[in-house]
Amino acid sequence: MNKQTKVWLVLSIALSLLVLATACGGGGTNKEATPGTTASDAGTAPPSGPTGTISGVISYNGTPPAPKKIDTTADPVCGQKSPNLSTDDTLVKDGKLANTFVYIKDGTVDGGKKISEYNWPTPTESVKLDQNGCHYAPHVLGIMVNQKISITNSDATQHNIHPTPKLNPEWNQTQSNGAPPIEKTFGRAEVLIPVKCNQHPWMKAYIGVLKHPLYAVSAADGTFTIPKVPPGKYTIVAWREGQQPEEATMEVTVTANGTAKADFAFPKAGAATSSTKPSLQMMPAIEFPMMGKH
Amino acid sequence: MNRGLNRFAIFVACATFFLIIAGALVTSNDAGLATPDWPLSNGQVFPKMVGNLFWEHGHRMVATTVGILTIVLMFYILFKEKRSWVKKLGVFALLAVVAQGLLGGLTVKLMLPLAVSSAHATLAQLFFCTTVSLAVFTSRSWIEARPLTEEKGNLPLRYICTGALVTIFLQLILGATLRHSATWDRHLPVELILAHIGGAVAVTLMLGSASLSILRRHPESRFLTRPAIIALALLVIQLGLGIAAYMTRLASPNDPQPLNPMISITVAHVACGALVFVTTIVLTLRTYRVLPASETFLQDYRMGQDLHVNPE
């Protein structure tokens, strides 16, 4: 055996072993999230005492883009169950926008501590994400760091759930019909993690992972409520998917037993959509911050 | 010359071209992770091929077939071929297809890292190049080719063609990296697009000058002019497909799913790129076969070397 043959042989064996080790390890699909901060970690417990609420309405300016029809025929099960499936990135009803993720990004609780310095206990109940009609329900959801997300498959076909986070470990797992729920956690705060199904590429969902429970997703009528907010001054962010995701921020002051109003409107000024002219279209005034009553 | 061996080598090369198309369809449909496991698909040898699993598992089935064909080709060559270097190339083809399969598994298990996916796409082109070369070396036209008496230019055609070949290969690597840098629902990185456009200009210049030089210097030799004309025609088609692929890919992030014409045009662009590459390989190999290195060029080169060593 000459030297060249030996080199090729060693390279081939090395590559084979690498692939086999990866294949047998199964590490790519079932990685557990890196543990993050939990309630048991050293830190300050959330402030007790009276809390307030942040509520508001998400409006949509102009004519929303028409939903696009999804071709589900690639999988007969999807074709039969959801023959008229269409995109839901901009769900607007009477000028109000659903599926907007609103959360407290930063701020200071009355008393001087930053909101990020508190450790909220991880909820024991899991958040549900279902695959039904080759469509994720809900489309946008929020969970806390290390809270369980329970993913179910209500379709008579296989799906694969594939979150593509930037800060948390990526995983990709197949779930056939009748398989037990897949339960996962995310160990780091990350807003928002896209989730897709590579078998049905139109299937998309977004998960907002936060260290605190101070978030909400706007309902079909565009309303949202974030309850049990400690009194303080906060920066809140509203994120909406759209054809091009966009964010809006606002400063609010929450008082004990009061309700701070935080209305948002999309698209933001200057943002062009397929249905609005690219010329600047001014956004109606945002109401903020309205002080809650004592 | 064994006609059966040559026909089988051509068949394997055609199967490899089909495999490249199957692989391109996986990328364009965003089906690479339709199943997270490998070598089985969802734990099965023959899963229900619905949705994107059709493309991913279909690609695996075609790849397995090509792998088996390559094994057969290698043994065919080992038993029927007398030239030892052709035998070595047959063994190399088998090693390349095995490495390609392992790279395919690795990219699935690692969830499509850019480097591994691009390497998988690039090795695919190199493997195609190998099978086409085997088809060329076992052909009657290669074995019976008579060397032309002289080069009709200062810069030997073999070097011009080699330059074009290297440029095309670098462009293929850029194209593979560009394609795998973002899925259909995300915009492609501008710097890679610009690099790929720059590569297209370089390929046009290099391949254009190689083909036109052949047509000008050796218009009587069909052995050389035929691949040169085909390469030129494919280059023109490829440039058109590249522009069309770019336009459709620009719009795809707003689509609800990967759709035609983006899928068909980008796949055609990949396939045509592979054809440009192998046609240039045929062209280059043929220049090496029938054209000597220019004596004038070699003399100049030697003189330059002497001057470099002995400046006085």
Image (cartoon, grey):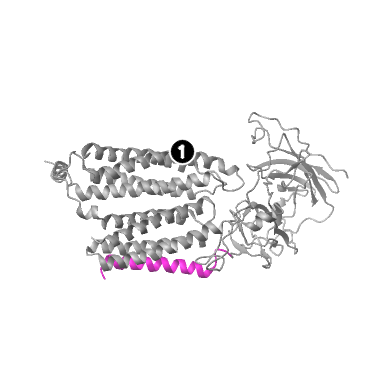
Q: Is residue A215 left or right of residue A72?
A: right
> Looking at the rendering, in which quadrant would you find the C terminus of chain A?
top right
State which region is magenta.
A1-29
Q: Is residue A2 rendered magenta in the image?
A: yes
Chain for disc number 1: B
> Looking at the rendering, in which quadrant would you find the N terminus of chain A?
bottom left
Query: Quarter-wise, where is residue B10 in the image?
Result: bottom left
Q: Residue furthest left?
A: B312
| Residue at x-position 73% and y-position 60% | A127
In the image, residue B191 sits, relative to residue A33, either above or below, namely: above
In the image, residue A173 sits, relative to residue B289, either above or below, namely: below
Residue A87, horizontal then vertical, whole percent: 67, 46
Residue B288, horizontal then vertical, whole percent: 22, 49
In the image, residue B48 sits, relative to residue A235, either above or below, namely: below
Q: Is residue A189 left or right of residue B162?
A: right
Q: Is residue B181 left or right of residue A54?
A: left
Q: Is residue B83 left or right of residue A57?
A: left
| Residue at x-position 45% and y-position 52% | B21
Observer able to see residue B33: no
* Disc 1 secondary structure class: helix
Between residue B14 and residue A23, name the one nearer to us: B14
Between residue A50 and residue B94, name the one nearer to us: B94
Q: Amino acid at mark 1?
A: Ile
Q: Residue furthest top?
A: A279
Q: Residue furthest right?
A: A294
Q: Is residue B67 rendered magenta in the image?
A: no
Between residue B206 and residue A42, name the one nearer to us: B206
Q: Which residue is labeled 1 in the image?
A: B243
Residue B192, horizontal then vertical, whole percent: 46, 43
In this figure, what is the number of numbered marks? 1
Label 1: few (<14), some (14–19) or many (≥20) C-alpha neighbours in 10 Å = some
Q: Main secondary structure of the magenta part?
A: helix
